[in-house]
Image (cartoon, grey):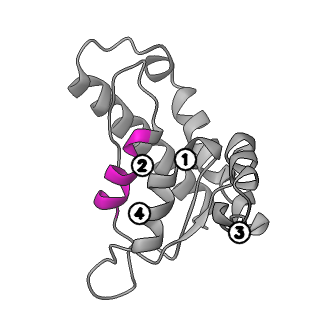
Amino acid sequence: MLILTEGQAADSPQFITALKKMRVRRPIGRPRTRPDAVAGDKAYSSCGNRSYLRKRHIKAVIPEKRDQAANRKKKGRQGGRPVSHDAGLYKERNTVERLINRLKAWRGIATRYDKTPESYLAGLHLRGAMIWIKDLTRTTP
């Protein structure tokens, strides 16, 4: 699943939109619309994102920003509890980062030569298919 934004826009505002579109495949039956956990970096540490995850009973594997932690501590007991952080699950987040780096290794995606969002999205899908096929041939005996 890919969501395009303007070039100067950050990706963290698209967090909830991406989660609404996401489907988790199962061996049989319909895909789930709610993952067990979501990992992200500190950019996704907003109160809105965390409350959305809490409402849907999804574990947030997102570290807390220093300024948010300081603000929470400054409020004392009214600031709430510190956020929990599963370091083991957070380490697995690098899988996504490596995929993004592999996508950007293709010059057309890294430099955004395509003029229209449709052609850029088509390039992302093409590059994703190329990566998938290459990995598939590596793992197949």
Q: Which mark is residue 5?
A: none
Question: Within 10 Å of the Cα at label 1, are there few (<14), some (14-19), or many (20+) other Cα atoms?
Answer: many
Alpha carbon separation for disc pair 1 and 4: 12 Å
In this rendering, position of residue 120 left or right of residue 52: left
What residue does disc 1 label? Answer: 44
Quarter of the picture holding the C terminus: bottom right
Q: Nearer the viewer, mark 2 or mark 3?
A: 3
Name the secondary structure under disc 1: helix
Q: Which mark is residue 15?
A: 2
N-term-proximal mark, 3 vs 1: 1
Alpha carbon separation for disc pair 2 and 3: 19 Å
N-term-proximal mark, 2 vs 3: 2
N-term-proximal mark, 2 vs 1: 2
Q: Please state the extent of the stretch shown in magenta in the rendering.
A: 13-22
Identify which residue is drawn at 51% across, 77% down. Answer: 36
In the picture as drawn, the residue positioned furthest to the bottom comes out as 28
What residue does disc 3 label? Answer: 84
In this rendering, position of residue 31 left or right of residue 139: left
**Type of amino acid at the residue the image marks with label 4:** Tyr
Q: Are marks 2 and 1 in contact (CB under 8 Å)?
A: yes
Alpha carbon separation for disc pair 3 and 1: 14 Å
Q: Position of residue 83 (x, y in %)?
A: 68, 64
Q: Nearer the viewer, residue 117 or 90?
A: 90
Q: Are marks 4 and 2 in contact (CB under 8 Å)?
A: yes
N-term-proximal mark, 4 vs 3: 4
Identify which residue is drawn at 44% across, 53% down. Answer: 48
